[in-house]
Amino acid sequence: MPRLYKPYTIGGLLTVVLLVRPGLIAQEQPTIEDNSYFIEEAYNQEEGVVQHISNGLYIRKPRQDFVYSFTQEWPLFVPEHQISFTISYSILNSSTVSGIGDLVINYRYQLFTRHHWAAVAPRMSVVLPTGSKSEGLGLGSLGLQFNIPVSKRLAGSFIAHFNAGLTVVPIAHGSDSFGGRVERSLLLYNLGASVIWLAKSNFNLMAEFVENFDSEIDENGGVVRFNETIVSPGFRYAIDFGELQIVPGIAVPLTTTNGRTYVGTFFYLSFEHPF
């Protein structure tokens, strides 16, 4: 993201993750004060500012899937601390499955700001199993997620972002080929990077890359691992109405897993204003 419980994945449950907004850098071309899509940026919300984020992901083949997610972010008293939540609604398998996904509660700490060697804002999230696992809408059990985003202003009109994350599912439920109940612990990892070109003060071109290292319970009751690669070009555009900033954006993520590549369309819209 944007999965809710495993960052920036398109495959599997096809859910989208919350991300955070960049700030302004003194005496340099300003960025749009908004989010990336699949790579988390290391800038917390400013004091007294709330952001409402809507994401939509549509994949047409091999079957039609659509996932909508909503995220809301606030500073927690001071900008060093940020809280947020994300919830999603999915229509999967060519409209044969639909429902809400897992609810994710997030906390971030601004360890370093853009005025240091780089901005760093570690995040910890709790995944509440509000989505149905049997229908592919959620984990089916409690999960914990950790991510370390790093953001660095490069020479000229470019900003780079880097992510390293881990999702822990202490008790994942599954079943074997005989219908027996199986419980396993799952670890899922993610690495990613993006480059943002500040083409204009209100228009950015984006290139994002994510590698997910997934695991799941197979029909034998064991844990199998597989990789998922996402390459996503996109853009975003800012429109200001007084203290309200509206940012629409579009990306075309290409996801490769198990030797197959899927093309998706990612829609983004945020509203940001003082409170």
Image (cartoon, grey):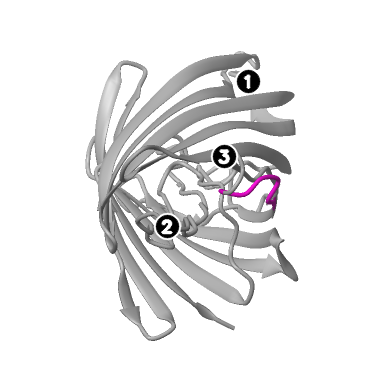
- The residues bearing labels 3 and 2 have C-alpha atoms spaced at a distance of 16 Å
| Disc with the residue nearer the chain's start (3 vs 2) | 2
Q: Write the residue at 68% across / 51% down.
A: 110
Regarding mark 2 in the picture, which secondary structure is present there?
loop
Q: Quadrant of the C terminus?
A: bottom right
Q: Splitting the image into 4 quarters, where does residue 267 fall?
A: bottom left
The Cα–Cα distance between marks 1 and 3, rounded to whole angstroms, is 47 Å
Q: Position of residue 166 (x, y in %)?
A: 64, 31
Compared with 30, 169 (above or below) is above
Which is more N-terminal, label 1 or label 2? 2
Q: Which residue is mark 1?
A: 176
Q: Residue 164: give x, y in percent of width and height.
A: 58, 30
Q: Is residue 106 above or below residue 60?
A: below
Give neighbour class at mark 1: few <14, some 14-19, many 20+ (Cα, 10 Å). some
Q: Amino acid at mark 3?
A: Ala
Q: Of the residues shown, which amino acid type is indicated by label 2?
A: Gln
Furthest residue toward front: 27
The local crowd at label 2, few if under 14, some if 14 to 19, many if 20 or more residues have their Cα within 10 Å, is few
Q: What residue do we see at 55% from left, 60% from top?
A: 87
Using residue 36 as the reference point, say whether residue 119 is left or right of it.
right
Q: Is residue 192 above or below residue 201?
A: above
Residue that numbered label 3 is attached to:
118
Local SS, label 3: loop
Residue placed under numbered mark 2 in the picture: 27
Q: Quadrant of residue 55?
A: bottom left
- Residue 50 at what x, y percent from top left? 56, 73
| Residue 201 magenta-highlighted | no
Q: Which residues are the magenta region? A: 109-114
Circle 3 residues within 10 Å: few <14, some 14–19, many ≥20: some
